[in-house]
Amino acid sequence: MGVVADYLAVRTSEAEALLEQLGVGHTGQTGDWSGAYYAGRAFETGWYVLVIQRRIFDADRDLPALAEGREIVHVYVDDVVMHSTAVLLKDGQVVWRVTSDADEGYSEEGEPPAGLAPILAELRRNEAEQDPDEPQVDYVFDAPIEAAALVTGFRGLADTHDPALGAGFEWLEPPARPPRVGLFTALAQLFGLGRKG
């Protein structure tokens, strides 16, 4: 089964304000991020990551208002259709965006983190070195996840992630209803509530 997930990251000092704004509550229960529809964790990098196992946010429509007065990293991954994208917004404006799509290829907007170039080169090298007689792996799919990880420290949605990065998340209580700012779709409300079990 594939991964379809959004994640938002804000500076740790902004975490409580973000959760309150989204209507997400604490449970005190911890585990791997994949154990709950909503899970959050602070990283030593000074970023708090909120993973949502649904597509909730549209970076262009929903996030500029959420990023007013703060920095937000947003990552969306759908490994069923092989699409991944990461974007950093600051004060409502896109600073950079990295996208990998099976149909449309790889693209960058703005200036992604400097450390991404050697990572991308290695991913492309791995792709080129594949045996043509074997099923092909889309290594570049991980490039947006790696771009975000250079900022936040979380690469847990990548195929090759360190399992330790997926642990230590608090399983969060989903919002009872969409917040007034209209970030959640009706579909997400119907199917994205509650812990997995």
Image (spheres, helix red, strand yellow):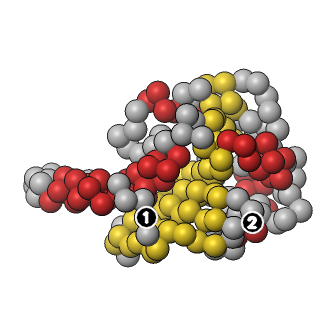
Gap in angstroms between the C-alphas marked 1 and 2: 20 Å
Alpha-carbon neighbours of circle 1 within 10 Å: few (<14), some, or many (≥20)?
many
The residue sitting at 49% across, 42% down in the picture is 153
Is 156 placed above or below 139 here? above
Q: Position of residue 163 (x, y in %)?
A: 44, 30
User: What residue does disc 1 label?
Assistant: 112
Q: Position of residue 104 (x, y in %)?
A: 38, 75
Q: Earlier in the sequence, mark 1 or mark 2?
A: 2
Q: Position of residue 154 (x, y in %)?
A: 50, 42
- In the depicted view, which residue is nearer to us: 39 or 53? 39
The residue sitting at 15% across, 59% down in the picture is 128
The residue sitting at 80% across, 33% down in the picture is 26
Direction from residue 26 to residue 81 in the image, left or right: left
User: What residue does disc 2 label?
Assistant: 68
Direction from residue 126 to residue 44 in the image, left or right: right
Can residue 20 be seen here? The reply is yes
